[in-house]
Image (tube, helix red, strand yellow):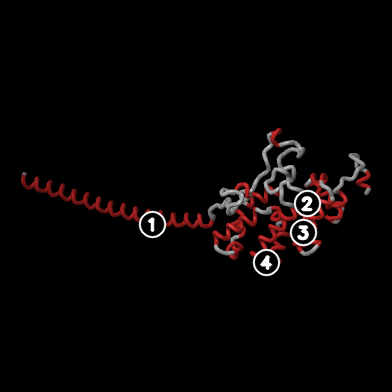
Amino acid sequence: MDRLRRSPLSKNVPTGYPALIQILGSLEAAHKAINREPYLLKEYGDSFFGKLRRLRQLMGSKSAAREILKKAPYLLLRESSNRVSSGIRKAKFMHMTFEAMKPIFGLEETRRMVLERPELLAMGIELPRALGFAKKKLGSWEAVGDQWESILVRTGLVEDMVYAQKPRPREGYWSPGISAYRTGTPAASVSAWSPARNPSGRDGPARGRWDEDPDEAEGEGEEVGEINVQDAEMVEQAWSVAEQEAQKDAGDETKDDDYRAAKAEIVS
């Protein structure tokens, strides 16, 4: 409290400040989260509790939910209005991500993975859409689980997770109420698996980014390399045969010259 009394900025306590201290368990943890995400001070404390409740349900314990929020305090923030998925509540974002991973890895493994990488919970609807497409391409959920890291890279979700972890404001200005149309500020990054970027329309089958598998590309390169080596060996053999024939022809020509010289001597 002495730290609060010594603050020269204002005597008023921000609305979400007491809630953050209670949720994160200590004053230091709350200040660390605020330093990382200053926009937390603009939120109402009541807006945090729905997300906290959903996290506790998904993770099965209060301590696990607290650890996730310490690592990723941005999960308590609302999405900005220019996000395509802004109509979906952040608590539902978390639920959709968790339910998309659970059939692949099981409940306990999903909890472990989410605790290790909380940014997965910020993917929302994009993750189940991308994983559904990956299952169609690979044939089963088991194959999706085996190639999990590769799929995150091939679908571009790794880049989306990096963007989700960037401290707000991610657009580089401190006035979220200013219209982006008047300032010319670009809209927030939209995932390739967002319904708005679906080539077949919002209601069409989920389609998005799907890069070639790097391992398959390396395999193809190895096959091409083997073919090139075989071609080189064939060319080398052909050259050696050609050289032998050239030497043989040169030897025959030398013999003919010697014969003509001896014949000339005899005739003379």
Write the residue at 61% across / 60% down: 148
Where is mark 2, residue-wise? Answer: 76
Q: Residues within 10 Å of mark 2 (few under 14, many from 20)?
A: many
Q: On residue 230, which mark appears?
A: 1
Q: Amino acid at mark 3?
A: Leu
Q: Residues within 10 Å of mark 4 (few under 14, many from 20)?
A: few
Q: Quadrant of residue 13?
A: top right
- Separation of residues labelled 2 and 3 (CA atoms): 11 Å
Q: On residue 55, which mark appears?
A: 3
SS of the residue under disc 4? loop
SS of the residue under disc 2? helix
Sequence-first tag of 2 and 3: 3
Where is mark 4, residue-wise? Answer: 106
The answer to whether residue 213 of the structure is visible from this angle is yes
Sequence-first tag of 4 and 1: 4
- Separation of residues labelled 1 and 3 (CA atoms): 59 Å
Q: Residues within 10 Å of mark 1 (few under 14, many from 20)?
A: few
Q: Residue furthest front?
A: 203
Residue 3 on image: x %, y %: 91, 46
The answer to whether residue 154 of the structure is visible from this angle is no
Q: Amino acid at mark 4?
A: Gly
- Separation of residues labelled 2 and 4 (CA atoms): 26 Å
Residue 242 on image: x %, y %: 28, 52
